[in-house]
Image: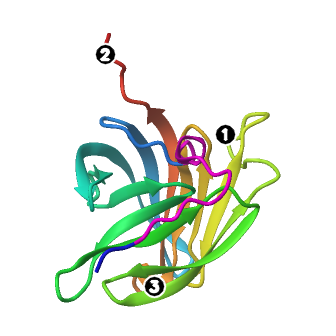
Amino acid sequence: MALSFAQRCGSSTTEVASYFPLALSHEWVYVDSVWQQGQLTDVFMDTVRVVKQGAFEKLPTYILSDGRELMWRNDTLFQIVFQRGGYRLPTVYFVAGAPKSVFNYAFGGDVVIQRTSELLDSCPGRFGQKGSSCYRISDACGGDMILQKAIGPVYWRLGHCFAEEGSVLTKTLVHFQPARQSK
């Protein structure tokens, strides 16, 4: 089954891709905090980097060290996931370009949750410098992610669909290292 990726009027892959910049060797360093029943139980450092390029239906994908495979197309970031039969398919991960979008996100092969991406008036946290632009992606499982233009994910909380009952994982960006340009 082939998928059709129709371009919306006025959308630009380059413009919206800056909310989750993908290039070989991009690196994000996070402080991860594990909460059990409202109590902080563990804190550790976590590094996510773009480790290689792939392809899906002749479109470039980027494979991260945490196993996610991501692909930009027009105003949408897709995650390539596997269904039970082993089929690879793109699921909407994030929609930019509109003040608010609601979409379905498939995880675990055939489990679907609703997500909302919403443009924020200002960016929270230490990366929220004046004039910066952020989107919040929230889901029906209590998850939350903040994407900042030119940096990518600066914060996320994995909701109860992705963790043990009463357990929450938060990831807070402490350093972003874009890929070094070769001369």
Question: Would residue 167 be found to the left or right of residue 52 on screen?
Answer: right
Residue 30 within the segment the image draws in magenta: no
* Residue 28: % across, % down: 42, 42
Residue nearer the viewer, 66 or 61: 61
Residue 10 within the segment the image draws in magenta: yes
Tell me, for residue 161, which label it has, or none.
3
* Residue 133: % across, % down: 71, 44
Residue 166 seen in render: no
Q: Give the range drawn in magenta.
A: 4-19
Residue farthest toward the right in the current orientation of the protein: 121
Label 2 sits on a secondary structure element that is loop
Which of labels 1 and 2 is toward the front? 2
Question: Would residue 164 be found to the left or right of residue 56 on screen?
Answer: right
Asked which quadrant contains residue 1, the reply is bottom left
The residue that disc 1 covers is 126
Is the residue 90 above or below the residue 152 in the image?
below
Residue 145 seen in render: yes
Amino acid carrying label 3: it is: Cys
Label 3 sits on a secondary structure element that is helix
Check disc 1: other Cα within 10 Å, few if <14, some if 14-19, many if 20+: few
Q: Earlier in the sequence, mark 1 or mark 2?
A: 1
Q: Earlier in the sequence, mark 2 or mark 3?
A: 3
Label 1 sits on a secondary structure element that is loop
Q: Which of marks 1 and 3 is nearer the N terminus?
A: 1
Is the image coloured rainbow, by chain, by secondary structure, or in one colour? rainbow
Tell me, for residue 35, which label it has, or none.
none
- Residue at 53% x, 47% y is 13
Is the residue 77 above or below the residue 114 in the image?
above
Amino acid carrying label 1: it is: Arg
The residue that disc 2 covers is 182
Q: Are discs 1 and 3 less than 8 Å apart at CB?
A: no
